[in-house]
Amino acid sequence: MTSLRRQLLAGILGSLALVLAIAGTALFAHIRRAVVTEFDSALAARANGLLLVVEQTRKKVDVDLKDKFIPEFQPGAECDYYEIRQIGGPFIARSPSLDVTRDLPGETGPLGQFYFFDLPLPDGRRGRAAGIVFQPRLDLGKNNTDPPPARVTLRLVVATDRARLDKVLASSGTGFALAGIAALAASALGIFLAVRRALAPVQRVAGHAASLTERSLGVEFPVAGMPREIVPVCHRLNELMSRLGAAFERESRFSSDIAHELRTPLAELRTLCETALRWPGGAEESEATIREAAEITLRMERLVTTLLAIARSERGAAQSERAAVALAGLVHEILEPLLRQMVERLITVTVGIPESLTVTTDPALLRVILSNLLANAGQHTPRSGMIRIAATGGSILHVTISNTCAGLSEADIPRLFERFWRKDEARPSSERCGLGLALAAACAKSLGCDLSASLPAPDTIVFTLSIPQEQRAGLPEFAPAVV
Amino acid sequence: MRILYVEDSRHLQKSVATALKRAGYSVDVCGDGAEGLHRAGSAGYDVAILDIMLPVMDGMEILRRLRAAGRDLQVLLLTARDAVPERVRGLQAGADDYLVKPFALDELLARVGVLCRRAYAKKNPLITIGDLVVDTARRSAARAGTSVDLLPREFRILEYLAMRAGEVVSRTDIWNHVYDELTEPMSNAVDSAICTIRKKIEPPGSARLLHTRRGMGYILSE
């Protein structure tokens, strides 16, 4: 597995080593050139001294040098060498240290300019030489009117041991290398500490993430003391954890609720059967037991079917068949079986949807949504209350169902569409299982509509089904009608 | 023994009440928490079976209020909530037992039987007074080894007297603990039942066990 710290360390140290190597090499080359130039200048100065004592007369080339006064050219362990030779001709002079059987290796250069080269000295040492091709000055004697002789061209080579030069260069090179390695090591330590410190917040975030379980999703990623770059990451993670925690809680509550919802009818069925088996009654009693068992089974079936419908709608798996639906007609059709009970409870029902208003949508899903919203309104509207169904236009068609309610608070609104949620946890009737609004919301989502609830007054709740424009076919005209 | 069953599912109300009655208990049923609290607060119930999720007031709240008011009747929580923390919460709130739905009917009856005995500090289902043996588990009685044939209500009275053997039990106590709310009150119902029981458990020549304390009630003792 790749390590961020290792990658950073390797990258930074590699780059630093490369920079140090290039800089060290360039600096060393510059110093080397300066040292060699200095060494060569000393050689050239000695050669210049020799040039002064060479002169051409009418008959020969004369070297007026008293060797004994220049001890370094005398034979010895650390002696130097010189040689003056005519270009393409015989040698003119050489140092006593130079064996007559050996010549200094010759190179030539432009006339009057020094050139330098390395060479093996006659005694085997490594040497460096300065050479110059020159024409000696003329000594024609006094009052001589004869024409001057042809100028000879000579080559002077002065060679010396380069051990001192090599030693200086080697110690400089070693010094540079050691300094480079030391700088790299010190940098590595500094970089390691800096990287560790810089990555510590990432480590803390990773440690926190590793310690998370489904039970500790509420524990937030720490933001205090985090670097500016990590803070947004922590905020996003905290938001994600919050959503995840809510989803976990919802799913956990749902699992618990579904278990509870099935446990009760199962208990009913089991107790009913065991009682009947233990104390069998007559034919009439047995028939009542079977009828009751069938009723319980139907309730369980309804529960499971509704849950499946919600799951399918949430997955968007519901079959979507589009057709034009007359909204007012559909509302009246759904209201019809509910009206008797509403009238008995003195509930006023108002429908404010124009007859001409149609929507192009899935008729079955729209019926499920409106049936559940209207059944919910019918069940929860108190005696002598009011239910109002209306449609208002605009870019989006809003179908609103408002009814009188009691005991709801703003805190209840977000939970209204949760599966199995009831304001009162108990089961007031076997017909209700707390899934109607959840099913309506899932179907609305499946249709691409929005279903929301609001509490404009403490005793009034409004459900709004917002149908997008592409599903509308007729323009609504506000024309309330009392049913 | 008289039992109060507070449950909002009408199917369970019917089945469990039938089973308890057939098992020899007097049973009263109600469907919401407020009514359940009101009834449990009245005298006469030996055991209350409470659902937790109830309309108006939940079973835990009923339990808490009963205990706060000093009512020490035996309480069995019968609920679909099966998580351990919920059981612990129920028992810590003062419940004597906890049973999760769905349940086996035999187990419910056995637990109710245990709670009834516990209400009178009896661990053994067999209660012996002289040579009379009352078997609260099998719902039978025998005198000197001979089985006594009792009607269900007669057995319930004998069982109640046996549970309180050695104590004077008033007619009101017998009425409250043995007769359910649907029984029409009759001034001599208890006296006539006692008379019948006496004839059955005290055959000629046997020692008297069921004594009358004039103006006070009855006592079952040697």
Image: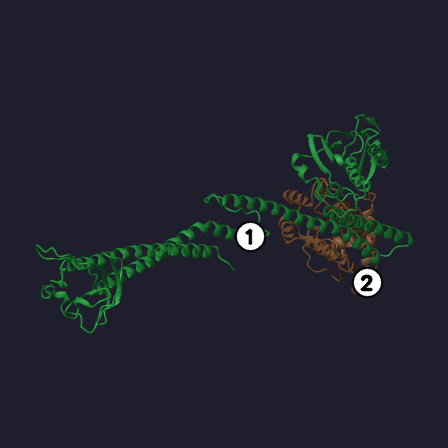
Label placed on residue A373: none
- Pinpoint residue B11: horizontal percent, then vertical percent: 80, 48
Q: Secondary structure at mark 1?
A: loop
- Pinpoint residue A90: horizontal percent, then vertical percent: 20, 68
Nearer to me, A406 or A132? A132
Amino acid on which the number 2 mark rests in the picture: Ser
- Residue on which the image places disc 2: B147
Colour seen for chain A: green
Nearer to me, A81 or A363? A81
User: Label 1: chain?
Assistant: A
Q: Residue furthest front?
A: A146
Packing grade of label 2 (10 A; few <14, some 14-19, many >=20) is some
Q: CA distance from mark 1 to mark 2?
A: 68 Å
Going 46% across and 56% down the picture, which residue do you hit?
Answer: A7
Going 33% across and 55% down the picture, which residue do you hit?
Answer: A26
Colour seen for chain B: brown
- Pinpoint residue B86: horizontal percent, then vertical percent: 65, 50
Amino acid on which the number 1 mark rests in the picture: Leu
Packing grade of label 1 (10 A; few <14, some 14-19, many >=20) is some
